[in-house]
Amino acid sequence: MITSILVCVLHKFTVRYALLVLMAAGLWSSNALSLSFASSTFGSIDAKVRAIALAVMNGLGNLAQIYGAYLFPFKDAPQYYMGFGVISGMLGFGVGVYITMHILVRRWKP
């Protein structure tokens, strides 16, 4: 989230490129993190239901490849404030969800 915000603020090409590399690394690693978190949290659920839930999660996560192209229209080049603003907001929301889920899962013990 921090790198996405910095990409909106900083406009030097080499700095933005380095930040985009770091941002992409964080985005791709968060996908694996969410799937591993869900699979361990859904451990007590029936195996078929867990498989469907993980497939839906993975599918929804990959929807970004479809709508993401529309967040970066050519007319916004080279800053792309809308695209990076949406990414920053979604990452902030994700941080909030992970913190909330961490607290709720620790409190809920079967």
Image (cartoon, grey):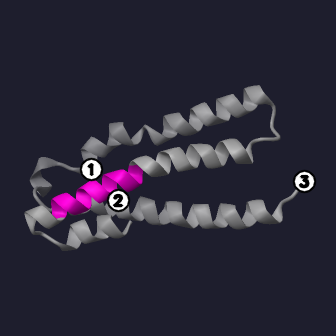
CA separation, marks 3 and 2? 37 Å
Tell me the amino acid under the disc marked 1: Leu
* In this picture, residue 54 sits left or right of residue 90: right
Determine which of the numbered discs, if any, sits on residue 12 in the image. none
Q: Are marks 1 and 2 in contact (CB under 8 Å)?
A: yes
CA separation, marks 1 and 3? 42 Å
Q: Which residues are magenta?
A: 16-27
Foreground: 41 or 61?
41
Q: Secondary structure at mark 1?
A: helix
Tell me the amino acid under the disc marked 2: Val
Q: Depth-wise, is mark 3 or mark 2 nearer the camera?
A: 3
Q: Earlier in the sequence, mark 1 or mark 2?
A: 1
Foreground: 69 or 100?
100
Q: Position of residue 103 (x, y in %)?
A: 71, 67
| Residue where numbered disc 1 is placed | 71
Q: Are marks 3 and 2 in contact (CB under 8 Å)?
A: no
| Residue where numbered disc 3 is placed | 110
Q: Position of residue 14 (x, y in %)?
A: 11, 63
| Residue where numbered disc 2 is placed | 86
Q: Earlier in the sequence, mark 1 or mark 3?
A: 1
- At horizontal 38% and vertical 65% (from top left) the residue drawn is 1
- At horizontal 77% and vertical 29% (from top left) the residue drawn is 47
Q: Secondary structure at mark 2?
A: helix
Q: Residues within 10 Å of mark 1 (few under 14, many from 20)?
A: some
Q: Are marks 1 and 3 in contact (CB under 8 Å)?
A: no
